[in-house]
Amino acid sequence: MGEHITEKAPAKLNLSLDVLGRLEGGYHALRMVMESVSFGDTLEITLRKDGEIRLETGLAWLPRDGRNLAVEAARVFREALGEETLGADILLTKRIPVGAGMGGGSADAAAVLRGLNRLTGRPFDGEKLRELGLAIGSDVPYCVCGGSRLAEGRGEVLSPLPMPPECRVVIAKPSFSISTASLFARIDGRAGRTRPDTAGMIGAMEQGDLGGVARRMFNVFEDVLPRSCRDVGAVRSALLDHGALGAVMTGTGSAVFGLFAGDGEAQKAAVALRSLCRDVTVTEFAGEIEV
Ligand code: C5P
């Protein structure tokens, strides 16, 4: 049983996102094709034996109390283990932009669950960690294992998918952030919306057809964005103009990403996108995370 561990927290992207209807408790039934990328945060976790949970980050504006999902995850883990004296020092190196739809807070929470589980001799299996994650947020169960998954229900019903075909991913985040709850509210009552072809997307992934995947990238939230979020469309157009095979907003935004067949094109597009957005990253899809 070690005392210290470094855990990566990969960002997530939605290749497609569909809202199927409303669930009880204010949530919505979703169907999402989710992918992890190599880009993400890093958390250094050290066990404490006094029950204290402390978070350090280089960013002064980031909450360091229970509002930060990494702290909440440590609290949830301590409670599940039933050991009041279990605590942690967490040093968070934040790279995933906040309010981007890239699951940054959820990825950090999942990393804390995995890290504390390892540091305490793996008392819980992946399924239990995902269950603990759902109490923290809808994207946390996915972030516990990451990789290529179909996520349904609130986001916690996960089925494995083949990895998308090899490609480069350029992510660009406009300077504004979008409130998740407000976008969910805007989608209610919008029946007859255009829907993503999720089955077709999965078929294209099975066939290793990058063009087929790119063509089917679709997020229903893009259709209900307020006028103040017009930059999302501008960033998507810029990605396509610079050679992306497909581009889409991830989650409830505001980040948009595009798929590129080669690194050269991706790097060139990233240079061009930097005149529109400060936050531009070139990365690639990454596989499952070991629990
Ligand atoms: O679960 P989480 O705290 O991440 O969700 C944030 C908000 O997003 C919820 O309060 C709800 O408004 C919305 N949401 C939803 N249906 C989901 C997931 C999130 O309506 N499946």
Image (tube, rainbow, N blue to C red):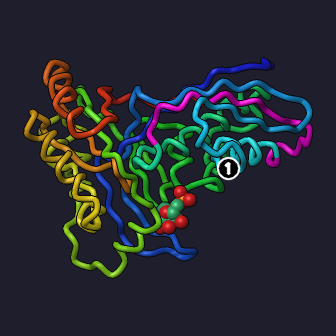
Q: For the C terminus, which image quadrant? A: top right
In the foreground, 49 or 100: 100
| Magenta residues, start to end | 79-97
Residue at numbered disc 1:
132
In the foreground, 99 or 112: 99
- Relative to 140, is 103 on the left or the right? left
Q: Residues within 10 Å of mark 1 (few under 14, many from 20)?
A: many
- Relative to 168, is 161 on the left or the right? right
Distance from mark 1 CB to nearest ligand 1 atom below 8 Å: no
Rendering coords of residue 285 (x, y %): 34, 30
Is 82 inside the magenta-drawn segment? yes
Is 92 inside the magenta-drawn segment? yes
Above or below — where is 1 with respect to 246? above
Q: For the N terminus, which image quadrant? A: top right
Question: Who's the residue at 24% across and 32% down the image?
Answer: 274
Question: Who's the residue at 22% across and 28% down the image?
Answer: 270
In the foreground, 130 or 66: 66
Q: Which residue extends farthest bottom?
A: 189
Q: Quadrant of residue 203?
A: top left
Rendering coords of residue 117 (x, y %): 72, 32
Looking at the rendered structure, the secondary structure element under dot 1 is helix
Question: Who's the residue at 38% across and 56% down the image?
Answer: 252
Tell me which amino acid carries mark 1.
Leu
Rendering coords of residue 179 (x, y %): 44, 61
